[in-house]
Amino acid sequence: MSPDPGGVSRRGLLGLAIGAGAAGLAIGAGAGATAGVAVGRARAETAAAVHPFFGGHQSGITTPVQDRLHFASFDMMARTDRDDLVSLLQDWTYAAARMTQGLDVSVSGAVGGSPEAPPDDTGEALGLPASSLTITFGFGPTLFELDGVDRYGIAAQRPSTLEQLPAFVGDDLDPNASGGDLCIQACADDPQVAVHAIRNLSRIAFGRARLRWSQLGFGRTSRTTTAQQTPRNLFGFKDGTRNILSDDTAALDEHVWVAASDTPAWMAGGSYLVARKIAMLIETWDRVRLSEQNDIIGRTKGEGAPLSGGDEYTEPDFAAADTTGAPVIPVDSHVRLAHPDANEGTRMLRRGYNFVDGNNDLGRLDAGLFFLSYQRDPGQFIRVQRSLSTDVMSEYIRHVRSGLWAIPPGAAPGSYVGAGLLS
Amino acid sequence: MSPDPGGVSRRGLLGLAIGAGAAGLAIGAGAGATAGVAVGRARAETAAAVHPFFGGHQSGITTPVQDRLHFASFDMMARTDRDDLVSLLQDWTYAAARMTQGLDVSVSGAVGGSPEAPPDDTGEALGLPASSLTITFGFGPTLFELDGVDRYGIAAQRPSTLEQLPAFVGDDLDPNASGGDLCIQACADDPQVAVHAIRNLSRIAFGRARLRWSQLGFGRTSRTTTAQQTPRNLFGFKDGTRNILSDDTAALDEHVWVAASDTPAWMAGGSYLVARKIAMLIETWDRVRLSEQNDIIGRTKGEGAPLSGGDEYTEPDFAAADTTGAPVIPVDSHVRLAHPDANEGTRMLRRGYNFVDGNNDLGRLDAGLFFLSYQRDPGQFIRVQRSLSTDVMSEYIRHVRSGLWAIPPGAAPGSYVGAGLLS
C-alpha cells in the first residue's frame, strides 16, 4: 500500500487507532490536529502555553525553553520497510500535532472510544492544558544506513556530516544507551504532559519502532529569550547566559538553521541535534573551594559575571590580567574554551536539562546535565568539544550517553515530519 | 562531647559548616531558621509558598500536596554513636528549617563564605523561591536495633509496631533499595528545590549517614485539600479522590496522628510513613479495553465516578446490582477492596507520586507510582494491603521497593526533630 505523497495515509491513520476499531476515522493531519474533539483536556490555557506544531521549523528549538524534558531515542524494528517508516512518521505527526494543542492523541481519545476497545490515549494528561508542550523529531545516522544496508531507500539522501560523533576526551559512553534511528524531544512546563507525549508516541510506534533509551530532565539550564532568567546547573552555576536567543535571527540563520543553499536540500529549515548525557561528580565538585570553582568556570558562582568583571551579561575580557600578569579568566576555564573567540566564532543553541536518576551503591547521586545543542552543522559541536579537551571542568564530569540526529524542517499543515525526505 | 539537651549542639553546627571554617557561627536553630541572611534567594514568594518547619506536627503530611518529590533513605555509617545521631538530626533540622524558608543551608551560603573554602550550599537553588518546600524526617526500625545491636541506646523506645512490613502478594522487593535507618521526604512545587534539599542534606550527613536509595517523583497523585484537583496516575485514572483532607481534623486524629494516649509517648503528634515503589506494567495495561479498565478500578476513567453512578465525589454504592443481579462495582475492583467499608473503617492519608526512571531493554518505560501513606499505626496499611491481595489490578503492578518509618512530631523552635526520642 503506497502512502499518499505529502499527506497522511489511511494506513497511517489506521496504525494510530491501536485496537480501537476506529476504522471510520478519516481526518487529515492538519484538520485533525487543530479541529479535533477535545476529550476532557482543559482549554483555558493562555495562548503562550500553546505552541504551533506545523511550520517552517520544528518547534522545541527556539521555543522559550520549557521547564521539563522527556527525551527518547528509538530504533526501527527488524523487517520494517519504507512504508512502515512513512506511516510511523505520519502517525507521530498526527498525534504530536494534537497533543501540542492539549488534545488526546486521537479523536477517539482516552474515554471517547468504544468501551470494548483499549483507549487510544493512555489518559494521564486528561484535564491538563497543553503546558507549552513541544515535540521535536530527529533522524539518526543509522536510519539512513545500518551495517551497510539501506533499509528505507534513503542512504543517498543522508547528510554527509550525519555520522557517529568522533571520540572525545572524557567519553565513557554506554553504546546501548547512545544513538538511535529516531529521536523525540518532548519539552513542557508540566512533566506529566511531557511523559504522556513520549509514552503515547512510543505506544503508537508499536510494531514499527521501539524505545532504545530515554531520559527525563527536571530543570532547564538554558534560556532562549531575553525574558527568561538564566537557570543553574548542578554545579550551582548559571548555565546558558550567552545562548543564541530566539529573536536573534541573524545568529539563528548563521549557526542553527540549515540554509537552502546547504545540502541536502530536504534539510533546509532543519538543524542538527547533539544530545550528551553528562554525569557530574557532584560530591567531588562540592569539596572544591569557591575560588577554584569560579576559576574552573571563569565566572562567579553568585552573579554569574565573568571573572574579568561586570555583571552576568558583560562580555568576558580574556585579555584582562592580574598584577602578576596572569589572565584573570584562566586559560583552562570553561567559559574561555567554550567561547566563540576560542572556536573561530562557533556558536550553538543549547537547551539542556538537569537530571537526577537515583544514586549509586556508594550513596552518590546519579546526577548531571543532559546537554542538548542545535546547530547548522554537527561540526560546530565537534569543534567546541575538542576545544574543551583541556577544560579543568572535565575532571568533574563524564560523558555517558551520546547521540546525533538530523532535525528535519517543520511539517506543512496536511503533511508530516520528514515528508521532504520520504515523499 | 554531649549535645545540649533539646537544643542545637555546637558540634552539630560545626558539622554543618563543611570545610567552610565557619566556627564563629552560633545561632540557635529557631533563630537561624527564620532570621538568617538570605544569600541571593528570592524573597518575593507568596506566603502560601512557604510552609513552617517548626510546629507540633512535621510539615509535608497535611500540607497541600506539592507537585514534585525527591525521597531519600539513609543508613547510619558504621561506628557512629548516639552523639553522631543527635548532631546529624540537629544539623538536618537547622538546614531544613532554612531551606523551607527559601534560604541557603547555612548563613555562609553558596557564595557568602570564604573563597578559600567549599561553599556550604551547593548553589543550584540560588535565586529560586521556597516553592512550597517541605522536608519530613523519619526513623526506620533498623535505627532502633540492627542485627540485635542497640547502636544508639534507643531500642527500648522503639514503637512495637515499627518493624519490617510483612510480605504481601505481588511483592518483588529489592532489599538493597528498601528500608533504611532514616528517611527524608522533600516535596516542592519546583523539582530543583526538592533535589537541592536532598543533595544538601545528604552532603551534611557526610561521615555520619549515607544515602541508601532515593526516588524522584514528577507528578503528585493525591490531594490533601478541597481546593486541589485530583490528579491522575499512570493508569490514566484519577487517584486520591477519597484522601483524608487537611481540614478533616477528626479523621486526622483518628487515622493519621499518633495520640498522646498511644505509646511510646515520644511519638505523640507523629505518624507512620509507608513508602512503596510500585512498578506499573503500563504497556500491558494500555492493551486492556476501557470497560475492563473501569471494572478493575471500580470507577470511570474519564470522570472518576464510581461505577454505581454520580460524579467523582459521590460515595460508591457497593450494593448496586445490574439486571442480572451482579454487583455494578465488581467484588475484585480496587475501589471496593481499598474502601474503608471493606477494611473495618481503615483509612490512610496518601501523597504518592508518579515516576518514570528510563526504560528497560525491551523498550518499556520503567514507570509507576511511588506510594506514600501516613497513618497512626502501620497496621492500617497492612490491613488494606492484605485486602488488596485479590485486587485484579495486582496483575498490572509489582511492588519493587518498600519501607516503613516512624515520623516523629515536629520540632519546637530551638529544638530539633527527634529531640523527644534522643534528649
Image (cartoon, coloured by chain):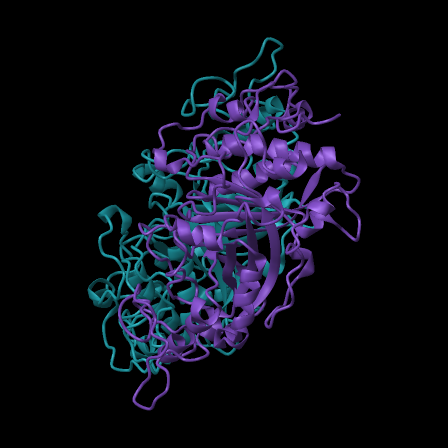
Chain colours: A cyan, B purple
Residue extending furthest front?
B261
Q: In the displayed structure, would residue A77 be above or below residue B68?
A: below
Whether residue A407 is visible to the viewer of this picture, yes or no, is: no
Image quadrant occupied by the N terminus of chain A: bottom left
Task: Say which residue appears at 73% left-offset and 26% top-offset.
Answer: B2
Residue extending furthest bottom?
B324
Q: Is residue B117 left or right of residue A265?
A: right
Q: Is residue A286 left or right of residue A274?
A: right
Image quadrant occupied by the C terminus of chain A: bottom left
**Residue A284 image offset from top left, x and y in percent:** 66, 35
Find residue A393 and report its image quarter. top right
Q: In the displayed structure, would residue B411 be above or below residue B11?
A: below
Between B179 and B375, which is closer to the camera in this rendering?
B375
Whether residue B409 is visible to the viewer of this picture, yes or no, is: yes
Q: In the displayed structure, would residue A21 be above or below residue A157?
A: below
Task: Say which residue appears at 22% left-offset and 67% top-offset.
Answer: A36
**Residue A8 image offset from top left, x and y in percent:** 29, 72
**Residue A280 image offset from top left, x and y in percent:** 60, 41
**Residue B296 image offset from top left, x and y in percent:** 43, 76
Find residue B310 and report its image quarter. bottom left
